[in-house]
Image (spheres, coloured by chain):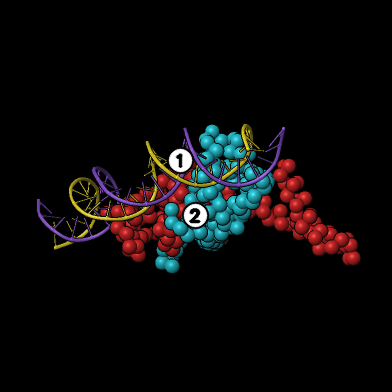
Chain colours: A red, B cyan, C yellow, D purple
Amino acid sequence: MADDQLSATFAALADPTRRALLARLSQGEATVNELAEPFPISLQAVSKHLKVLERAGLVVRGRDAQWRPCRLETAPLEEASGWISRYTEIQAERLDRLDEVVQGIMRRSAGGPAASGAADQKQRTNEEETGR
Amino acid sequence: MADDQLSATFAALADPTRRALLARLSQGEATVNELAEPFPISLQAVSKHLKVLERAGLVVRGRDAQWRPCRLETAPLEEASGWISRYTEIQAERLDRLDEVVQGIMRRSAGGPAASGAADQKQRTNEEETGR
DNA sequence: CGGTTGTTCAACCTCTAAGTTGAATATGCG
DNA sequence: CGCATATTCAACTTAGAGGTTGAACAACCG
């Protein structure tokens, strides 16, 4: 795994056990034992998963006697979500523009060129994006 | 890496090279050679990265003579974004509720308990969340 | 056909992730 | 203190990721 923040976050999220741990923590703080209870793996393995989440900044841990209560930290999730949204928003714009173009054609052609026109226009839209 | 869709997507995003490939593809389709050009690694390594992205459903590939044009597919990103938003939205609600509580205190106490009251209330809010 | 270009396959190396077991550390309790 | 509980550390195994090089495959071009 690369050592930048975004890579650490995505790598941490790439494991179902760790995602389940985060889901549990979204209900509130919990100790390692509590977190480990539902899983068929050893306590030490869960402890390792928590260390991964901690290094990614997704959980922070306090100290309460012999317990180490874990708490969810969502800041890295915001960053990850922000990275992803750069692409999903582009896609949304793309569909919006296609929609505009198609509607323009449909308005203009009450009896004009046939249905294949929509596909042609999609192609032209892609070319515009490539050039930018 | 686990074999579910979400794990595959997050694992694919956990590598800076692959994220850069997606960034390039957001500008439009590209061939393997074009994609590999900016990177200091071998063409074969880039080809492997593309295979990872393809298995995650983030790119689809056509065939144009000896070229294999790659295109970005954002559906898995939507899914990943949806998963993350379950947590960032919880966090937003949490802050909203805290804000309401703090504002309630400030309205009620024009001359009441001092500034430390805000911190106390934050603690109580956290306890409520733990119980849910 | 033979050569060139684009891409993938195969074998290999090295490093790390994820799991195990067993021992060590830290804290509360009788 | 001595023991129980919670958690981590250390050593090890297995499997996979990411990189390399060299060969193979596919399609165009003279």
Chain of the residue under label 2: B
- Residue beneath the point at 48% across and 41% down: A4
Q: Are marks 2 and 1 on the same chain?
A: no
Of C24 and A100, nearer the camera is: A100
The amino acid type of the residue labelled 1 equals: Asp
- Residue A21, given in percent of the width and then of the height, sits at 41, 59
Of D20 and C11, nearer the camera is: C11
Extreme-bottom residue of the structure: B132
B114 lies left or right of B66: left
Q: Nearer the viewer, mark 2 or mark 1?
A: 2
- Residue B92, given in percent of the width and then of the height, sits at 54, 58
Which of the image's four quarters has the N terminus of chain A? top left
Chain of the residue under label 1: A
- Residue beneath the point at 32% across and 59% down: A41
Q: How many numbered circles does the render carry?
A: 2
Q: Badge 2 is on which residue?
A: B8
Badge 1: residue crowd in 10 Å (few <14, some 14–19, many ≥20): few
Above-or-below relation of D22 to B21? above
Kind of element beneath mark 2: helix
Question: Is residue B102 visible in the rendered structure shown here?
Answer: no
State the CA–CA distance, disc 2 to disc 1. 19 Å
The amino acid type of the residue labelled 2 equals: Ala
Question: Is residue B52 visible in the rendered structure shown here?
Answer: yes
Extreme-right residue of the structure: A111
- Residue A103, given in percent of the width and then of the height, sits at 81, 61
Badge 2: residue crowd in 10 Å (few <14, some 14–19, many ≥20): many
Q: Badge 1 is on which residue?
A: A3
B128 lies left or right of A81: left
- Residue beneath the point at 59% across and 46% down: B22
- Residue beneath the point at 43% across and 56% down: B2
- Residue B84, given in percent of the width and then of the height, sits at 52, 57
Kind of element beneath mark 1: loop
